[in-house]
Image: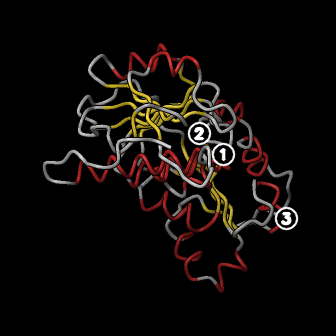
C-alpha cells in the first residue's frame, strides 16, 4: 500500500481543514487522534473516514497495529505528514477523521438529566464535563452558542471518547433549548451563591442542569429561565470551583440520589 509522505497530500490537507469549526461543518467530520481515542471510536462502531498511521511505530506497538487492522481506510504515513495533519504537539502514531453525528432534533422526555453548557470557553472544561456527564448517566448535552465548539480537537481529546456515546448539539439558542426540553423539565442552574445546596435538590425530577462559563458564571438568560439556583457549600475562603469540577460534583450527586432506593438525600441546610 502506497504511503502518505508529504504534508501537501490531499488527505493531510483535508485533515488540516478539520482543525477549524468551518472546516468541520463543511466536511461533516471531526478529528480524532491517538490509539485510545481512535480505539474508542472503533469500539463504538463510529464511522471513520480515513486514518493515517506511523507504520514503523505500528511494528513495535501491538495496540496500534491491531487498531489499524480494524480500519479499512488506514494509510501508512510519514511522521511529518501525521504531524501536519494532527492538532497535537506530539502526535501519538495515528490520526483519523470521524463522521459528525446527525443533528439532534428531539430529546426523550424520560431522560432524567440534560446537561446544558452556558458559555464555557475552555475546551478542557467542556470535554471533562462531557466525560463526567457520561459517567453519571447523562445521555444528552446541549451547548449554547457562546460555548466552545463541542467537536473541536481539544474538546474531543478532553472528552476521552464521551462524544461517541452522548447525544450532542452545539450552538443552540435559548429558544431551541426550551423547544428541545419541553415544558415538563425543571431548569436548575449552578451558581456560586445559589439558595439551594446541590444535595438538597430532588434529582429524581426530570431536570435541565445549566453549568455556566468559567469567568462570569451563568448568563443572565440562564438565571432568568432557571427555577432553581444550586450552590456547592465551600469552606476555607474559597468562593467558587472550576466549572468542570463544580458540574461534575453536582452530576454525581444526582447519580447518587437516583441510585439510592427511595431517596431524597439529607445534609446540612446552609451554604457557605
Extreme residue toward the top, this view: 175
Q: Position of residue 174 (x, y in %)?
A: 50, 17
Q: Earlier in the sequence, mark 2 or mark 3?
A: 3
In the image, 244: left or right of 111? right
Residue under label 1, please give it: 123
Given residues 221 and 228, the one toward you in this image is 228
Q: Position of residue 272 (x, y in %)?
A: 50, 43
Circle nearer the viewer, 2 or 3: 2
Asked if residue 175 lies left or right of residue 236, the reply is left
Instruction: Give the camera-side residue of 96 and 196.
Output: 196
Q: Which residue lies furthest to the bottom in this view?
A: 60
Q: Residue 243: percent from the left, percent from the top?
A: 58, 44
- Whole-Å distance between the Cαs marked 1 and 2? 8 Å
In which image quadrant can residue 183 be found?
A: top left
- Left or right position of 80 against 97: right
Q: Which circle marks residue 150 in the picture?
A: 2
- How busy is the neighbourhood of tag 2: few (under 14 within 10 Å), some, or many (20 plus)? many
Q: Tell me which label, 1 or 3, sits earlier in the chain.
A: 3
Q: Which mark is residue 2?
A: none
Q: Which mark is residue 80?
A: 3
| SS class, disc 1 | helix
The kind of secondary structure element at disc 2 is loop
Residue occupying image coordinates x 45% and y 17%: 225
Amino acid at each position: 500500500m502506497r504511503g502518505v509522505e508529504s504534508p501537501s497530500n490531499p488527505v493531510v490537507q483535508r485533515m488540516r481543514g478539520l482543525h477549524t469549526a468551518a472546516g468541520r461543518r463543511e466536511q461533516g467530520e471531526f478529528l480524532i487522534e491517538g490509539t485510545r481515542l481512535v480505539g474508542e471510536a472503533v469500539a463504538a462502531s463510529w464511522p471513520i473516514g480515513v486514518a493515517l498511521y506511523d507504520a514503523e511505530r505500528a511494528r513495535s506497538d501491538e495496540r496500534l497495529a491491531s487498531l489499524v487492522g480494524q480500519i479499512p481506510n488506514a494509510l501508512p504515513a510519514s511522521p511529518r505528514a501525521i504531524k501536519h495533519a494532527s492538532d497535537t504537539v506530539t502526535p501519538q502514531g495515528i490520526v483519523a477523521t470521524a463522521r459528525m453525528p446527525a443533528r439532534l432534533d428531539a430529546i426523550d422526555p424520560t431522560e432524567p438529566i440534560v446537561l446544558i453548557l452556558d458559555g464555557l470557553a475552555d475546551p478542557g472544561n467542556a470535554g471533562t464535563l462531557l466525560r463526567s456527564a457520561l459517567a453519571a448517566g447523562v445521555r444528552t448535552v446541549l451547548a449554547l452558542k457562546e460555548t466552545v465548539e463541542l467537536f473541536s480537537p481539544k474538546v474531543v481529546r478532553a472528552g476521552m471518547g464521551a462524544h461517541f456515546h452522548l447525544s450532542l448539539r452545539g450552538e443552540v439558542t435559548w429558544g431551541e433549548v426550551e423547544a428541545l426540553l419541553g415544558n415538563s423539565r425543571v431548569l436548575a442552574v449552578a451558581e456560586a451563591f445559589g439558595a439551594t445546596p446541590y444535595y438538597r435538590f430532588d434529582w429524581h425530577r426530570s431536570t435541565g442542569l445549566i453549568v455556566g462559563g468559567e469567568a462570569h458564571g451563568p448568563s443572565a438568560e440562564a438565571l432568568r429561565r432557571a427555577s432553581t439556583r444550586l450552590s456547592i457549600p465551600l469552606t476555607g475562603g474559597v468562593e467558587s470551583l472550576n466549572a468542570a469540577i463544580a458540574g461534575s460534583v453536582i452530576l454525581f450527586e444526582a447519580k447518587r440520589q437516583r441510585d439510592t432506593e427511595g431517596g431524597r438525600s439529607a445534609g446540612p441546610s446552609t451554604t457557605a
